[in-house]
Amino acid sequence: MFDSIAIVGAGAIGTYYGARLALAGNDVRFLMRGELAHVRAHGVRLVDQAGTQVLAPAAAFGTAEEIGPVDLAFVTLKATANRELPRLLPPLLHAGTLVVTLQNGLGNEEAIAAIAGAGRTLGGLCFIAATRTAPGEITCFHPGTIHLGECAGPATDRTRALAALLTAAGVRTHAEDSLAEARWRKLVWNVPFNGLAVVAGGITTDRILASPPLAARVRVLMDEVAAAARALGHTVPEAFICAQIERTPAIGAYQPSSLVDFLAGREIELEAIWGEPLRRGQAAGVAMPELARLYTELKQTTLK
């Protein structure tokens, strides 16, 4: 069903999942930029608690035209780069191509559906702690799971087939009947930890939780995001919120992806992760003063 796979935006997440799929025997083609020459020469290294695996050679390309039409395309660009999708996606599409966004925040499915069509668009939520630790090297601190769903409607046979493909490659994947609910649930963690890591001076998740004032802000932000989700018809239990806090110390001194981008001088996903949830929550009648405060702080910190 998926004889050829493209990874559009091979950063830490895209490279990790793409390499897992390739190591499992799939035809995976990476669309890369800065590390193209290195990966072509040396392949990709995956490092985790089980050891190191090397994908060599790796099929790395500099343009979507070089890759050509594929059966399945994973979009793992930062949401800030979605403006490039009208240029990057069309060369990868044939009549049956499915496109899956593995991006953070809200609004990504809509951006892809405008190009590929809603009927060919799926989304996935990556609960993972992985980062680039050297050229062509991805270190995974916590493999987590992918929660996969259709752009609109419940899981289908193709959703489950895609979940099975990823699971066979060693990536735990669940097919969701509500992608929107899954996105809001991920924001429960992403909004506080990605945001506070940046505005608190570039600190890791362990230091956020070690600070009573910051830990208190984490809980308030989580409650506001959950309240917005519930107002929009999604289920976010109290036990889920507590679990997000309880599981975080296990990943140690972790730099969330927004902090990695900020420290590298790259644009953070301000609107997708904080602005859009704030606007949607307020439109649903939910007061979100702590998120509004964090959104303002992030703009002041990152747009200088």
Image (cartoon, rainbow, N blue to C red):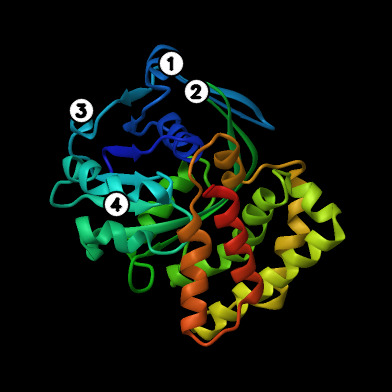
Q: CA distance from mark 4 to mark 1?
A: 27 Å
Q: Is residue 147 visible?
A: no
Judging by the rendered image, the residue that carries numbered circle 4 is: 99
What is the C-alpha distance between the residues marked 1 and 3? 18 Å
Q: Are marks 4 and 3 in contact (CB under 8 Å)?
A: no
**Sooner in the amino-acid sequence: mark 4 or mark 3:** 3
Lower position in the chain sequence, tag 2 or tag 4: 4
Front tag of 2 and 4: 2
Residue 252 drawn at (x, y percent): 77, 43
> What residue does disc 2 label?
136
Quadrant of the rendered structure where residue 71 is?
Answer: top left
Type of residue at label 3? Glu
- How far from the left and from the top, in percent, is residue 58? 38, 22
Give the SS element for disc 4. Answer: strand
Q: CA distance from mark 4 to mark 3?
A: 18 Å
Q: Nearer the viewer, residue 267 or 175?
A: 267
Q: Which residue is mark 1?
A: 38
Give the x, y percent position of residue 177. Answer: 43, 71
Q: For the residues labelled 1 and 2, say whether their Cβ atoms are less than 8 Å apart.
A: yes
